[in-house]
Amino acid sequence: MAYEIVQLAADGEIFEGWKEVTVTAAINQATRTFDLEVTEIGPWGANTYPPFHFPPGTRVDLYATGSLLTKGYILEYQPSADAESHGVSLNGVGEGYQFVNSSPDHETGQFENKTIEQIAQELGLPFDVTVKSSPEAAQAAAEKVPWFRIRRGSTPWAEMMRLLPQRGLTMSGQADGSIEITKASQQEHAGALIQGQNIKSMSANLSIASRFKETVVPGQSSLGTEDEDFEALGKAEDEEMPIKSRRERPSTAEGKQDAVQKHAEYLRDRSTGRSTQATITTPSFRDKAGELWTPNRLIHVAAPFLKLDETMLIERVVFHQDDTGGTTATLTLVQPQAYGGNKVGGGLSGPPWNAFGNNPAGGNGGYSGGGYGGDPYTQG
């Protein structure tokens, strides 16, 4: 276990010595979140007020042994006490919080011939939120949208999530507080997650519950006069799905045939990629090279008990440290195609595995749940 020195920088001061720390980051979460707990030295008398260092709205930077975890704000300050102790819990979010929580502030609410990146940047500008595209997403994010109107009472994040699935993209909160338009990367973490070595606990879910043999996405465009403008229909088949089933989901935004076809393929690949999921807790915030675990990075998983021996994509990281359980990072892993990548190497999670752990066919694949849904900061 590598104990981390967690420091919070606020108003020119550095604070450490936290009783418990939790930081969550994900490829499909537009802002990072954190929770900190500290015990205040006392006892405080009835008329004595302890220092109030972190009122809600305080701008903070959070570090783990010098590595930036997130830049953001304190949302909630929760003091508590009993006859023997006094404690404070701090809950906060990354700087992109306004993008996912505020209503859009745009002069017209309408965009014509703007790229995905330009639309996101205009929606983030009133809230001083920086939006950028990753190298993997640059080409798709540079595609122009002929016409798009935002909905009143929505949020910038929710409106972008109408457009991004049509291009196989998502939005991810970064350590520096910015939001990145992205898709599955090819960057790999050093080392591997290996059963019996650096895995503290593990579980997996192999399921066909959210997969469909056929995915259909109907859509239309208010621009143009051709049949495909009024009756666009995207179709994608999951050839490995053994059960005949069909899912129809209207496109989340206007689009012609090419856009709704990409949307159908996105839904199919997302369900397929999330059909093999693993949750692995490792006793360190860092990989073999000392770099913080990062969402949207690849890592090889060798866990025979989970029927996994393949390179997977980190979807979510939960950093946790306390004075009883020590230091851990819990990684949620999926197959890369869940976010527009290609399946990488090996794989023992397919149907040929039997109850005795034999895999005579050396099969790939596996099935597990996916679908939409999640908290306000998360694309499901």
Image: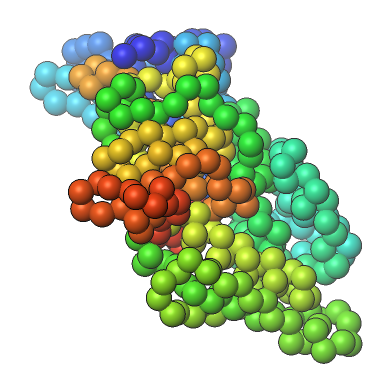
Q: Residue at x 63, y 39 (%)?
A: 185
Compared to 179, does 268 lie above or below? below
Residue situated in front as seen by the camera: 75 or 358: 358
Compared to 146, does 10 lie above or below? above
Residue 213 position, x and y percent, is 49, 74
Q: Residue at x 83, y 56 (%)?
A: 143
Residue 280 position, x and y percent, is 34, 35
Residue situated in front as seen by the camera: 324 or 311: 311
Residue 335 position, x and y percent, is 49, 48
Residue situated in front as seen by the camera: 66 or 80: 66
For this orientation, the residue located farthest to the left is: 83
Does residue 245 appear to the left or right of 304 in the view shown?
right
Does residue 233 appear to the left or right of 174 in the view shown?
right
Task: Give the image's coloring scheme.
Answer: rainbow
One can see residue 24 in this view: no
For this orientation, the residue located farthest to the front is: 360
Q: How many marks?
A: 0
Compared to 234, does 334 lie above or below? above
Compared to 280, does 349 lie above or below? below
Q: Where is the N terminus found, in terms of image quarters?
A: top left
Does residue 261 appear to the left or right of 338 in the view shown?
right
Q: Residue at x 53, y 26 (%)?
A: 189
Residue 202 position, x and y percent, is 29, 37
One can see residue 366 in this view: yes
Does residue 46 appear to the left or right of 297 in the view shown?
left
Q: Residue at x 26, y 33 (%)?
A: 201
Q: Quadrant of residue 347?
A: top left
